[in-house]
Amino acid sequence: MTTVVAHRGFAGANPENTVAAVRSAAAHADRVEVDVTACADGTPVVFHDSRLDDRGESRGITDGTGAVRELPPETVTAATVCPSDEQVPTLSDLCEATAVPLDVELKHPGAGTRHRGSLPPADRDAARERWAPFVDRVRGAVGDRDVRISSFYEGALAAVRAEGPDARLAALCRDLPTGRTLADRYDAEAIHASLSAVRDADLSAVDRTVNVWTVRTWQEAVAAGTAGADGLIADYPGLASRA
């Protein structure tokens, strides 16, 4: 049976990354994926973009302004996700208000440069140390919740693995070789690969769970199923019946 991971709480149907979205998605998904980034003081908040407004590459999905990593948590959590009455939650508050298993994607540790994908050996320790304080805050917020942590960033995966062998990890990737490299290096249970990365791949040769993102249409669900994906990271409920 195809596993369903609700992308940002089924972002196509709900105000993404909110308590309401996670609660709504819980009835239609095996797990719910949320994005987590750091405020100015390191508090993990559930938000995808780098800014609350529409400057740069951010979409302007809230009524707030400013870069999340430069703002205190009380400012970020006062922002409303438009068009809804839902506000940006801290990770702690979301975990207290919901019970569904979570996939937590680490987006930004708050400071320092980032490099997606595999790093040269000489850069790995510094990247792990840069992510470690934020990872510690995230792990503290989720407690003993059923959580799998994912990221495009090797430093994030390394910091989670450094906290213990039992942490559940997923390597996010836009190309399958990078995902396999990081999954092997940090003993990740899953690879979260883009649909374009698996279309022509032989997934039968991959000894990890492969979940495909971001599935938005039934045609994409069929393509993921044809490629042999184990799960869909989907924007809408009901797509797994097509996989």
Image (cartoon, rainbow, N blue to C red):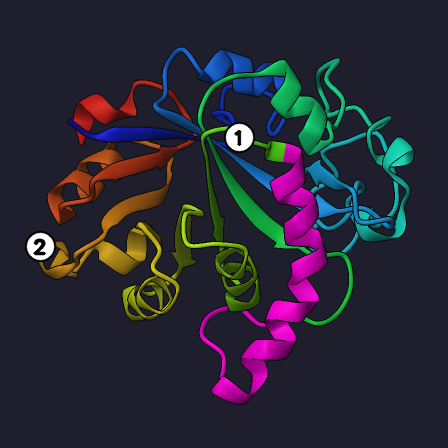
Other-residue count near label 2 (Cα within 10 Å), few / some / many at <14 / 14–19 / ≥20: few
**Residue 219, visible in the rendered structure:** yes
Q: Which residues are magenta?
A: 114-141
Image coordinates for residue 201, horizontal then vertical, percent: 16, 61
Please give the name of the residue rendered at 46% of the width and 70% of the height, measured from the top-left corner. 117
Q: Which mark is residue 204?
A: 2
Please give the name of the residue rendered at 60% of the width and 69% of the height, measured from the top-left corner. 128
Please give the name of the residue rendered at 51% of the width and 28% of the height, measured from the top-left corner. 145
83 over 45 or under it: above or below: above
Could you tell me which secondary element the residue under label 1 belongs to? loop
Other-residue count near label 1 (Cα within 10 Å), few / some / many at <14 / 14–19 / ≥20: few
Magenta stretch contains residue 122: yes
Query: 215 and 90: which one is in front?
Result: 90
Instruction: Identify residue for label 1.
Output: 144
Image coordinates for residue 17, horizontal then vertical, percent: 61, 29
Looking at the rendered image, the quarter that the C terminus falls into is top left
51 over 16 or under it: above or below: below
Magenta stretch contains residue 127: yes
Amino acid under label 1? Asp
Which is more N-terminal, label 1 or label 2? 1
Q: Which mark is residue 30?
A: none
- Residue 74 lies left or right of residue 81; in this view the side is right
Amino acid under label 2? Ser
114 over 81 or under it: above or below: below
